């Protein structure tokens, strides 16, 4: 009770930010006011940081602020501030300049409310608000002919995700007679559900999570979203597409059917393969980032499929910060000339495999019972093997490079472990994956890695060529989402000449 003032302080700071966004829409407000508005975005994050450190779990009305909610408040506030500071110059001169900042603010605040909502009705309502904001941000560029088509596709996909969650929330609330998330998902309430009801709930939750994450077979909207301005893409890929992991974590006591976890893994695994392949074969940097997001969200959902919801939350935060940085610096990317000495000897690969196997085994044995630990060990081993092979290209500084790689790996593991502890990653989950499921997941990843190595060594084979062309096709937008000769440039020229 004594710490409720921090929660009310967060609501007050969020209200100040929203009001400042409304004030910014008035044309009489000078443009330099945007700097004030951008700095105000840090207020909710500062309050959330205080709550994360000392407040613990606080219930206010229909909202519950726990470790995950506080973390999301810090993350969203910092992300919104960085993107809007970047947008001050990047979007300057755009005819919808003021609307961008206002909609970006409302979208990010709605995302924070989604993570803090503890009432089924509020969760259902707040889940759709950021999606509506994202569609509205995309629609601001209406002078671009592909935008109406992309907006319709996004609206249909997001509407399906929103409808699925609304059905789950209303059905669960009416059936249980409880509207708070904890009461509705208690063990007693879940036990009274029929098997077919749980199956429907699991299917709807799965659909609600994977559609905004751009997972196969619903990934086309994500591939075609590159028409959005860079700041909007940064918000999309760093904040909104990540929410599926959090949704499944919140509803973990209900998302328990083994078939649903297996299906989630299969869809995520296919998305990882497609997204990674697209990021490798396309030369457009922004499209590479889109493919990377598809693959990374697949990894996050694989963690959810294995019951490691806490790890998924840490993944979405760290990936969001990383991906926002890549998008905001995308305008400064310069193509690099291929490096001489790219060929790696067989001895280097053998050495890399030994190093990777040792590191992976040590990492796994440190906490063999942690969910998804085995998969993390396989991925660490593969990364170490690739890093060793690349370091072998250098005659000088190889050991220094290896020391740096090991140091960064240890640092990243320390950061991950601390975040897991601070976020309290013992998120309630009634699903414990069978050991055969975990080993099967690792086996599929290992087979995919071997297939990738074979394809790289036989890149001129008919199979590799067909795969290459198929990946290029999957990463290309549909004709309605492209504009070969941008007509909006001609309209800008006509307007400019008319003002002279």
Image: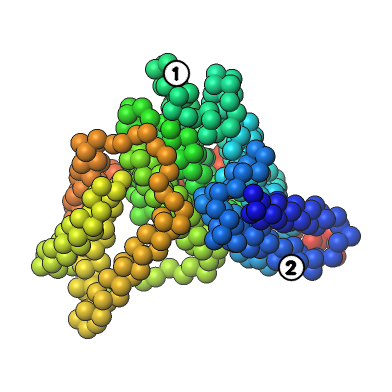
Q: At x 63% / y 63%, what residue is drawn?
A: 46
Crowding at mark 1 (Cα within 10 Å: few <14, some 14-19, many 20+):
few
| Local secondary structure at mark 1 | loop
Name the side, left or right, on which 499 lies relative to 368.
right
| Residue 249, position as x, y percentages in the image | 45, 40
Q: Where does the image place residue 491, in percent across and percent down from the top left?
A: 74, 53
The residue at 64%/60% (across/down) is 47
Vertical side of 418 occupied by 178: above or below: above
- Residue 485 percent across, percent down from the top left: 61, 50
Q: Secondary structure at mark 2?
A: helix
The residue at which mark 2 appears reads as 35
Residue 53 can be seen in this image: yes
Q: Nearer the viewer, mark 1 or mark 2?
A: 1
Nearest the camera: 67 or 255? Answer: 67
Tell me the residue that label 1 is attached to: 192
Residue 220 image position (x, y, % from top left): 48, 39
Q: Please state which of residues 62 and 228 is positioned toward the viewer in this rendering.
A: 62
């Amino acid at each position: 009770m004594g710490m409720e003032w921090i929660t009310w302080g967060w609501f007050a700071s969020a209200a100040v930010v929203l009001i400042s966004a409304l004030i910014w829409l008035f044309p009489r407000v000078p443009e330099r006011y945007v700097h004030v508005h951008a700095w105000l975005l840090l207020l909710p994050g500062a309050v959330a940081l205080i709550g994360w450190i000392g407040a613990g779990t606080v219930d206010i009305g229909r909202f519950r602020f726990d470790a995950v909610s506080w973390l999301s408040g810090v993350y969203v506030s910092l992300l919104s501030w960085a993107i809007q500071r970047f947008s001050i110059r990047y979007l300057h001169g755009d005819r919808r300049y003021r609307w961008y900042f206002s909609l970006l603010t409302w979208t990010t605040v709605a995302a924070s409310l989604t993570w803090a909502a503890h009432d089924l009705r509020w969760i259902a309502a707040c889940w759709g608000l950021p999606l509506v904001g994202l569609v509205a941000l995309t629609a601001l560029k209406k002078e671009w002919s592909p935008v109406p088509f992309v907006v319709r596709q996004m609206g249909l996909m997001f509407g399906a995700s929103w409808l699925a969650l609304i059905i789950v929330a209303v059905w669960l609330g009416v059936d249980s007679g409880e509207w708070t998330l904890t009461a509705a998902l208690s063990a007693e309430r879940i036990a009274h559900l029929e098997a077919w009801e749980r199956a429907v709930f699991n299917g709807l939750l799965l659909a609600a999570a994977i559609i905004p994450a751009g997972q196969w077979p619903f990934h086309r909207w994500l591939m075609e979203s590159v028409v959005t301005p860079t700041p909007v893409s940064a918000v999309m890929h760093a904040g909104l597409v990540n929410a599926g992991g959090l949704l499944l974590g919140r509803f973990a006591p209900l998302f328990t059917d083994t078939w649903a976890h297996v299906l989630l893994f299969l869809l995520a695994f296919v998305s990882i393969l497609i997204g990674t392949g697209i990021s490798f074969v396309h030369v457009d940097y922004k499209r590479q980032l889109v493919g990377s997001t598809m693959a990374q969200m697949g990894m996050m959902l694989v963690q959810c499929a294995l019951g490691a919801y806490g790890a998924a939350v840490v993944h979405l935060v760290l990936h969001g910060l990383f991906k926002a940085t890549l998008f905001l610096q995308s305008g400064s990317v310069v193509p690099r000339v291929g490096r001489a000495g790219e060929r790696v000897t067989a001895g280097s690969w053998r050495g890399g495999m030994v190093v990777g196997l040792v590191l992976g085994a040590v990492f796994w044995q440190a906490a063999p019972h942690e969910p998804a630990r085995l998969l993390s060990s396989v991925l660490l081993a593969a990364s170490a093997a690739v890093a060793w092979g690349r370091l072998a290209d250098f005659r000088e500084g190889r050991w220094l490079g290896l020391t740096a790689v090991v140091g960064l790996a240890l640092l990243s593991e320390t950061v991950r472990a601390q975040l897991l502890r601070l976020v309290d990653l013992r998120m309630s989950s009634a699903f414990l994956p069978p050991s055969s499921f975990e080993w099967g997941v690792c086996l599929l990843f290992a087979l995919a890695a071997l297939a990738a190595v074979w394809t790289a060594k036989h890149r001129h084979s008919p199979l590799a060529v067909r795969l290459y062309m198929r990946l290029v096709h999957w990463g290309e937008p549909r004709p309605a989402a492209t504009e070969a000769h941008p007509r909006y440039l001609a309209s800008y020229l006509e307007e400019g000449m008319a003002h002279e």
